Amino acid sequence: MSLSKSVREGSRIALSRVLSQVENRTHAGIQALDELFPFTGNAHKIGITGPPGSGKSTLVNALAKQLRLLQGEPRVAIIAVDPTSPFTGGAILGDRVRMLDLQGDPGIFIRSMASRGALGGLATQTEALSQVFDAAGFDFILIETVGAGQSEVDIVNLAHTTIVVDVPGLGDDIQSIKAGILEIADILVVNKGDRPGADQSLRYLKSMIDMGYRPLASSAGKHSLADSFDQEKSSQNEEVRDLWLPPVLKTTAREFTGIEELVTEILKHQEFLKTSGRWQLKEAWTLREIVRKRIEAILVHDFFHQLPKGLLDLTMDDVIARKVSPSSAVEQLLTYNRIRSKSHHSE
Amino acid sequence: MTEKKIRVLIAKPGLDGHDRGAKVIARALRDDGMEVIYTGLRQTPDMISEAALQEDVDVIGLSILSGAHNALIPQIIKKLRQNGQDNVLVFLGGIIPESDIHSMLDAGIYKVYGPGTDTRQVCKDIREAVEVKQAE
């Protein structure tokens, strides 16, 4: 029996093997993904992001436990991403330490993942892993990003619902959450709510939202204002966009305080996405991103593959000697490959 | 475009009070370019085999200081075999009396390390063992 079939039939060991094959981008992994793809598109993907030490893993632990109590005992998968050392390529994946409450529950599957050089808060293959869990029949997929600062916002391209976690005492005003990360929140959480300053953080965030600051989160990945206007013009349900105002919640994840309310908001958001048609839009966006990124990766790989050995080094010598500028060097290399591939064709 | 990293689970079974040694090893393996899943203190055999299954690790590194290795190790190995995880290599470190090392190896432990072991040796052993295992 093929690995992907065993995954569909609920084998946990097959699931684990396929996750590794997919993460390592082996041929078997690519084949399994192809076979599993028709069965994806059902899971609710929830991203959890926020600065290091804000309690993301502890929140995921509490959240998963609470989700399991819902009607029908939905199955929950967790992908926890931690950073890879840029110097050694190694990683310490320590998120499981905070998730000990979930041990022994067969409806939960936790997979730790190293970022392996990707900089957007996720690993390159995080999306692919979520597809495997989706096809394996998990109802919720919780994706915990690496500790994020300002620009680690890849999660919006993947998650249906993005939860941004903040903690009291990171700053005396709204600067504690950077604009980039506030923008992507569908739900804002002030964790460690038993600490001094929690209510103040809550107030700051609420007033920020109430001021009418509209996050562009729902138009996942749109960066400029012009883009979002374009999208608005083309979008039929222009008004629906503004119906979702990110709620701001206080939690103390370690004590399971505020978690029920968080789950309620997640379900409300799910309902909102589905009734407004945004669920399908997000899916379409995510799939388009997958295809785009794959093309980019292959083109870049092919480009360097086609370049004759040593040419890059030779060109770089000129750049280092400041005889050629970086952009002229790029132009030279691109031109070289173009001429080369043309002459190949005419042969 | 494939990328394969050695994945190691570091766990402390039993009731040991501290995990400094386990953290030193975790750090050394990380610096050697491996992906180390750290699960911390007071793990039961069930928890260890389940975590190893979910993480699909090549190697499990156990650290025991309490003297409970004779009770714990056979349980862990049994659990792994029951789950079909025979391919996982298990290393043991901590305070293991000389006279128990043989029985640990007989139980299915790949190698036993005592205090003062050079971490570079551990990294080297793991790389070699995984290479041999994968060639099989």
Image (spheres, coloured by chain):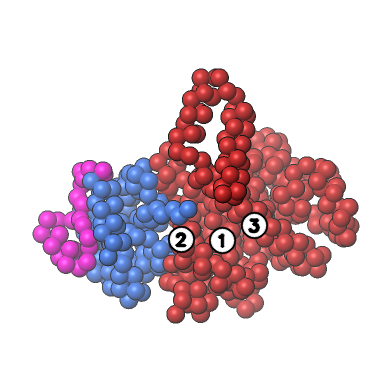
Closer to the camera: disc 1 or disc 3?
3
Where is A101 relative to A95, above or below? below
Q: Which chain is blue?
A: B
Judge if badges 1 and 3 mark residues of a common chain.
Answer: yes
- What residue do we see at 31% from left, 67% from top? B87
> Which residue is label 2 attached to?
A26
> Which residue is label 3 attached to?
A291
Q: Which residues are magenta?
A: B96-120
Where is B85 relative to A256, above or below? below
Residue B49, image x and y in percent?
36, 67
Kindly report the distance in space between the C-alpha atoms of the residues bearing marks 1 and 3.
12 Å
Kindly report the distance in space between the C-alpha atoms of the residues bearing marks 1 and 2.
13 Å
In magenta stretch: residue B117 = yes
Q: Is A83 in front, or is A280?
A: A280
> Which residue is label 1 attached to?
A128
Question: Which label belongs to residue A179?
Answer: none
Q: Is residue A292 left or right of residue A114?
A: right
- Read off the chain for label 2: A
